[in-house]
Every structure is written in C-alpha cells, then in structure tokens.
Amino acid sequence: MRILRHPAQAPPADRRRPGRAAWGLALLLVWLALPTLAQQPGAVDIPPILSPDDIHHPVVAHRGMVATQKSEASEVGLEILQRGGNAVDAAVAVGFALAVVLPRAGNLGGGGFLLFHHAADNETFAVDYREMAPAAADRDMFLTADGGVHPERSSFTHQASGVPGTVAGLTYALERWGTLSLADVLAPSIRLAEEGFVVTQDLAANLEVKRPLFSRFPSTMAIFFKADGSPYRVGERLVQKDLAWSLRQLAEHGADAFYRGAIAQRLVDDMARHDGLITMQDLASYEVKLRNPVRGSYRGYKVVSMPPPSSGGVHLIQMLNILEGFPLDVWGHNSADTMHHMAETMKMAYADRSQHLGDADFWPVPVGGLTSKAYAAQQRRQIDPFRSRPSSSLSAGQPAPFESSETTHFSVIDGSGNAVSNTYTLNLSYGSRIVAAGTGILLNNEMDDFSSKPGVPNAYGLVGGEANAISAGKRPLSSMTPTIVLRGGEVFLVTGSPGGSRIITTVLQILLNVIDHEMNIASATHAPRMHHQWLPDELRVEQGMSPDSLRLLAAKGHRVVIRSAMGGTQSILRRDGVLFAATDPRRPDGQAAGY
Ligand code: GLY
C-alpha cells in the first residue's frame, strides 16, 4: 500500500515507487514464494500484488479460488473445484449453499445477477435472474386510499415478493456452462440443511435482533427459533428440514419443482392464504434473461459488469470514465483531493441513476450515453477542484433510494481461468421475513425496490423515478454490481459486494485501490470507504479516514458524516496464473478458499 501524501508533496510518478532496496526485498520474496509468477517476464511491470511491506495479506492459491460471505459455502465451492468442477459448477453449488448457511441474504426465494467469463472463448455473459413483478401487480398497489405510500405492504407482506429468479438463474447457468449434474451440486446444500450447520456468534446475535419481526410469522419462527421460542446458541446446529425437502425436490425434478411442481404448489398455497399475488402462472412464466454485459475501459483494463435492470454496471463505468481524467495515484489514496473528486463524480452518477435507470425492457435507459467517454469528459469539466457542488444544483431527477445492505456476493475462478461473479439477494435482511409454509424458503421483498410512488418517499425514506415504477412483468431497479476486470484478454479481477446503494461505490473503490493505488487485494478490501449518492447531500465515510482529509473536505463544502461500515466485498485477483483473494472483514464468517 502506498504512503498517503498531500498533493503538494506528491513526487513525480517515476519517484513514487518504493526504493531500490525495498523493491529488491519484495521481488526476492515474491520470487521465492511464487515461482510461477517469478518465471513470467515482465511480471512486475504493473501494480504490485503482494509485497512484504503490506499490512494486509490476501489468500494465495494457484489453481482455483472461491470467496464467499460464509465459510461453509466457500468450502462447498472449493470441494467442487477440487473434484474437477468448473467455476460455474462451483458457483451454483455456492449459491445453493448460501441459501442454507446465510439465510439473511443467500436464497432460493430471491433473485440476482451472474457474470460468467468463459476463458476459452474470451467471452463474458450476463445472466439476469432478478425477480419479476407478478401479473396482478400494478403501479399503485402500495398506495393507501388517500394516495399515500403504505408503510409496510411493500416490505413485510406476501405482496412484497416478486417472482423469484434464483433457482431459474442458477440452473440456467449450470445447464449452459456447467459440467456436473444439478443433483451433484445440490448434494452439499442438502447435507447442510439436513444435518445442520454450526451457529456462529454473528448468526445467533442477528436472529435475536430479528425476533420481533420474525414473531409476526409463525412459519419463520418455526425455522429460526426452537419449538419453545428459545434461541439457537452459539455452537449449536441449525437444522432446516423443510429447506432440505425443497432442495431434494430440486435435485430430483430440476427447476420445474420450483416453477411448476411441488415447491411451486406450496409457495402459491401460502400466497393464496395471505393475500399474496404470485400464482402458478407467474411461476411458470418466470424467465431468465441472458443480457449483453456493460463494458468499459479504465487505464488499459477492460471492465465488464451488469446492465439494467441493475444500475450497477452503468454507473461503475460512468464513474471510472470520469475519474480516469484525474491523477488519483499522485493525489494519494483517501487524500482530500482524491475523495473530493470521487464524491463529485459519485453525485453526478447517482443523479443520473435516479432519473434514467429502470428495467430497460420497459423504459429507454440510455446505457450507451451514460457509459461513453465523451459524456464523462463533459461531466468531468463540471467538477470544481476547490468546491463541493451542492446536490440541489445538479439535475432535477429523483433521489436515489437507500436500499438494503443485506445482499451477498461471491466470486469464483477455476484452473482454466473461467470466472463467475455473482450477487444475489432477498432485498432486506431475510427479505420479507416470511417463510412460505412447508418449504423452508424465505420470500424476497424485492417489490420494495420499485418506486411505489415515483417522486414520493415511502416509510423508509425510499424515493425513485418514473423509470422504476411498478408494472406487471417488470424487474425492479437494483444496485448489484457483479464485475469482472480483464487485462490482455484474461481475467484480472473478480469482485462485487452487498450494500444497497453503496454497492456501486464500494466496487468502484476496489477497482481504484487496485489499479490507481497499487494495493494488493486484501489491502484494497480493508481500506476505509466513502460514499456519496447525491441525495442526501452528504459525504458518508467509514471510521479510519484521516481527520486531516475530512477537515479539508469540509473546507471545500462537503457535509462529512462518519457512519457504519459499507459493503462486504468478495474478490479474487489473478495475475500470471496466481490467485489472490480477500473476503471483506466488514462481514464476519466469510472465507476465501483456494487450492
Ligand atoms: N435489493 C438491493 C438491490 O437489488 O440492489
């Protein structure tokens, strides 16, 4: 990691490198530790990936790597890779495993986005398995008789659920690119659900916090608390028999079990009993969409990410395009100048997001314009290096929502250089908190990611634009940003994060930390983060920022607020065939596992 310098003290680029002695030592150690790397001519002509000077060190492996938010899921993925499965086999197994061991965000009853880079063809695919609004959904379904927004209907009722896409998305990827059978990749999850997994401190505490909400739904209490209502203690096993039944149905009958068969029937029965909208016809009509990823470039790297209905990829590339014109490396990581230019850039991107982004199958999203270098150049010229521009002076779109932070991401690379970057979610932590009776499946509350009433905040302060109004069959706008960075036609970085509206800026900072600030992937992950989303007009920072930077930012007119940690990245960096991975310490229980 580079030493922070005030811009005025920044030496010219050729003098910013470590001294010859430090380089010599670093090179010697890398040479000794990583023979594969050392044999590559020119292997250290780009930012260092590992140096003995670093405080934080990534997990290193040579063939395959899996990084997830829960160690059991990482072990499942690793086991699949070691048995000869490819990145898609491992990713699908991880996706099902997280539904068991990370119930707050891993899921069968939600949706998400999967990016797959196929090394042999040098091609990247974007699988959209976001939830769809049921046929009976309509624009005003969450409004009260007097035209207000109902405070809870879009979050904690059966009507809050979009038609889930996870099972369709994971099985689509497996059928198209995997090499193992669905039963094979489901086997570890069935075991984890049937035999249980060990409750950690984090899970025990989290379930207790959620007790008041869960207690409204007996079917949910029955899964996450004991029969007498007492909690599972740290070290005890959480067994999920109903979820095991659902997973076995999938192993025996494939995705049809979920969309047409026995699971579908139980989901729909539960909906019918509770005024929910999802019907057998909705489930049978669910469609995975194979989309063109959004693509951009940043300082010689190719960036591939998720297109609408996620806003993530579009605004990641928009922000990179703007920032490419600034010498962030000279200004230094988290210096006031760097943070000021990042904040001004973020503001413009989020202002655009609120106005232009929605499901592109329903609304004309100007993806090409927003991700063009020409537009970025025009936006860059609007940045005053000395003053923060008030959000009120930016375009008159609608504020970006504060979305939930309970999503989860996982990254996988296999020995052939194939990579999967997957982010999926139930929306809020444990989604609607409703388990559909007899399935063990938590239902998403993704309908809340639509704009219930464009332009008007709901009970949680969420406001959105016309582009994201509710419509039958439409997919709600997302911020999920599964991303793959390529260099010389090969995967260089696989990353992504939970964090609601902070996802996009979190992923941005992983890229900037690696590319501009020459951090190894562990340092890039651990470094304190910042976020500005246009409205509210505040620069949100994590603890650990230099007070001097924050003072200088305040002097430029920023309203700086120190808040809780943001994001929870799972990243793998690959160089010269060596894999370096980091799980984000902001979320306990994660693991990067490789071989
Ligand atoms: N529900 C959070 C997101 O899709 O970004």
Image (tube, rainbow, N blue to C red):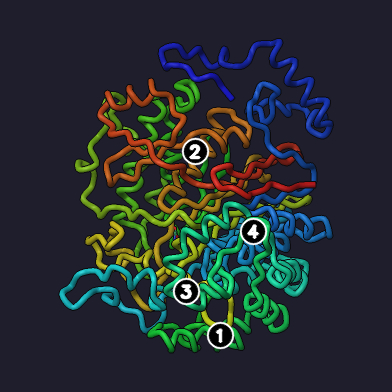
Where does label 4 land, which residue? Answer: 199
Percent x, y of residue 486 = 62, 44
Label 2, residues with CA under 10 Å away: few <14, some 14-19, many ≥20: many
Q: Work out how far the residue at label 3 is from the one at label 4, CA to CA, in angstroms.
A: 21 Å
Please give the name of the residue rendered at 59% of the width and 25% of the height, measured from the top-left corner: 1
- Label 4 C-beta lies within 8 Å of the nearest ligand 1 atom: no
Label 1, residues with CA under 10 Å away: few <14, some 14-19, many ≥20: many
Which quadrant holds residue 84? bottom right
Query: Which one is in front in this view, the residue at disc 1 or the one at disc 4?
Result: 4
Q: Could you tell me if the residues under marks 4 and 2 are in contact, i.e. CB atoms within 8 Å?
A: no
Pick the residue in front: 150 or 467. 150
Q: Work out how far the residue at label 1 is from the one at label 3, CA to CA, in angstroms.
A: 16 Å
As shown in the figure, which amino acid type bears the numbered disc 1? Ala
1 or 2: tag closer to the N-terminus? 1
As shown in the figure, which amino acid type bears the numbered disc 2? Gln
Where does label 3 land, which residue? Answer: 434
4 or 2: tag closer to the N-terminus? 4
